[in-house]
Image: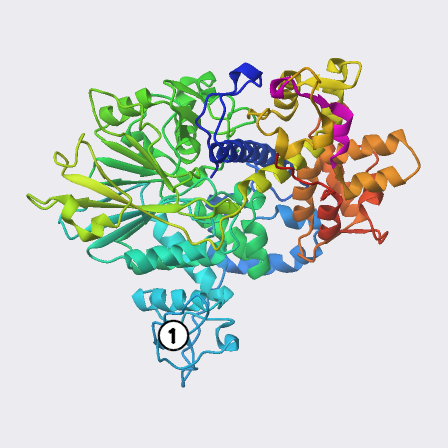
Amino acid sequence: MGCVDSRPDILGEAHQEPRLRPEELDWHVYANLDLQDEAEQLELARFLRKILKHMPTGTDDEGSVMSGPEKTLHDSGEDREKEEPAVQRESLVQRMSKGLSISTIAFHRAPKPAVMPESIRGAHLTVGVDGERLTNHRPVSMQQIAKYTIYEDEIDETTVKALLDLYRMGGKLAKESFQRLVRECYEMYLEAGNVNHVFVEEADERITVVGDLHGALRDLLYILDASGLPGARHRMIFNGDFVDRGEEGCETLAVLLALQLAFPDEVSLNRGNHEDEVICRIYGFETEVKSKYDAETFNMCCVMFRYIPLVTTINGVVLVLHGGLFHREDVTMEDIEEIPRHEYGTFEEGETAHKNPGWYRELPEEEQQRPMLKEINRDILWSDPMKEKGRELNRRGAGVRFGPDLCYQWLATNGFDLLVRSHEVVPDGFELPYRFCLNVSDGHHACATVFSSSDYTGIGNKGAVLSFRVKKAGEELENSKEISRGREVLPVGASSLEEAELYYVVYDFYTGQNKPDMGAYNGKTLATRILRKKSALGRAFEPKKASDGTVSLTQYSQVMTDVLDLQIHWRQVVPLVVPQEAVKVPEDGGEADRRIHVDTFLNSFDSVLTKKVKSAPKSDENDAILEQLYENSSRLEALFNFFDKDGNGEITKQEFVEGCDLINQRLPAGEQIRSAEKMLHLIDFDDSGMLDLNEFFEAFRLTDFRITND
């Protein structure tokens, strides 16, 4: 997932910045910050993959933590039992690099107790938001739902309802039952193709398309309550990015897998870019699973993710996939069907594939087919639409951006009328990216974005779902009460509803508690990024300073754009990040003549760590180490999580030094981390010789930063 701002690039020059309304400015800044964050996280993921490939013994040629599903899924249980004592003696790094065979895990089916405990298994309960029971079933204590086990021989509708009730009451699914859901879906997906085909043929049937959920269990529960469970007249498509970022990824995934098993013909799951081993290490799912279950369960999820189908079609004319279209025009549905999806990982196609999607053309012709198909797989998960015509590299760092001309062309060539995709947060949960770029000859919207996690990361966006239906003969849609509850009704493959046979209704919702202050969020995020680049900004501003130490707004905007690589309306966000005392207005000038006093501006950004360095005796070495810490903070944080395999939130001095050594193996000589032990001393606030995660985050916490709102 990411957030794409469709506005043209802003180069920072004053005359090139159209004035935005406050709500537009908030979203413009957030969208660009989120896009940059995704690109940085992808770069971090590439970095981690390089490290994994250079881990001591235990990795395969691909360098995957999993040692390759094809190889490990067929290991015998006896072999695994023999290996376990040796694994216990291995080093921390070696254990990190070991693979997992989920086919050898024994999934016990718990025997039914002779007397059923007072639990939620026997009744479908509805619980209010304040916890008050709305039905007259027997009370259930929290102790009784702290570890719920699925006893049924088959996962069915009753299981799904019990699981929903469990999660409504704050209960937890037992590890064995969670692993069972993963295992049984994995076995189902082994037999599935890359493309599912679903149909809505009668007026009382419907197909609900759900976009990114990202661990937002509250939104999933709302959607299922509002739309009802799947059934013979109601099919559901979940369009990827089920986990990461949200705090209830395990619960969200468990519900989706249970739905898949209970309604195999009525539910389709499409893989998203976050259903990926490396990505969900970066964005939080690994940490969540290990805190609620264990590392074995996380690795099982990663294996299963590789087998989730990629695409679903509706009535043969709507293409539903997570990201978007492709780096080449001649891709066909036959190509998509041939993708070896279980082999795909975001960074398995070489170091520069993201910069050159057609890299495989340099290979001998007979060797091009397989990497070409994997590149199409990447596009399906990562690409985004853009309003401009043509195609360009995606600023996310993977996939491409494709314009309305290419979208219309590809859909028409391959017999489709509409592309439904998710992958990016939009303010209202639904967006037609080409709404004002209509192809006059076609006269219909060819692309729709649906995003179903409301209040995503606390930014106050709506979520939405799409409901696809066919019209009754002579039906006037405006008279339908159910349709009138939707925000928008749109035709498929026609310029008007009267002409369309297939149409869809947009339903939006918001499950957040309070509307957040996006301006405050943006201000703090920008401040953190400025702090990370404080030294580089100082160097860039130095030759531009006037004798009074100030720079013009145009110079300020250009330096901020260049150094932070962030193309936003820097003049308009001055009140968010520049303290009033740093803004100088000449006596004979106006608002447009304001200047920024560089030292006052930069010195307003401080952290716990910088204050500690300032309080120590002056040392050029400390200053250099401080700059390296900020430049590598994301890498160090990721390595911290990698080395903290027991999950106790601490790593030793030796592990920290080993982590820095791993970073240095992948950095040019001029960028390598020096004096790892002294770096540790700076971060080790309690002088324990150990580094805990709280200390690490505390080191980079902003202090004394106040957002001004002029």
From where the camera sits, is residue 184 visible?
no
In terms of secondary structure, where does tag 1 sit? helix
Horizontal and vertical percent position of residue 624: 82, 30
* 413 lies left or right of 460: left
Residue 590 in the image: above or below residue 94 = above
Give the residue type at disc 1. Arg
Q: Residues within 10 Å of mark 1 (few under 14, many from 20)?
A: many
The residue under the point 70% across, 50% down is: 92
Pick out the residue farthest to the front.
588
Residue 599 in the image: above or below residue 364 = below
- The quadrant the C terminus occupies is top right
Horizontal and vertical percent position of residue 565: 60, 24
Horizontal and vertical percent position of residue 566: 58, 26
Pick out the residue farthest to the right.
617
Horizontal and vertical percent position of residue 440: 22, 20
- Front in this rendered view, residue 641 or 564: 564
From where the camera sits, is residue 343 visible?
yes
* 158 lies left or right of 493: right
Could you say which quadrant of the image residue 491 lies in?
top left
* Boundaries of the magenta span: 590-605
The residue under the point 23% across, 54% down is: 234
Q: Is residue 592 magenta?
A: yes
- Front in this rendered view, residue 96 or 565: 565
- Front in this rendered view, residue 360 or 277: 277
**Residue that label 1 marks:** 121
Pick out the residue farthest to the left.
474
The residue under the point 74% across, 30% down is: 581
Could you say which quadrant of the image residue 468 lies in?
top left
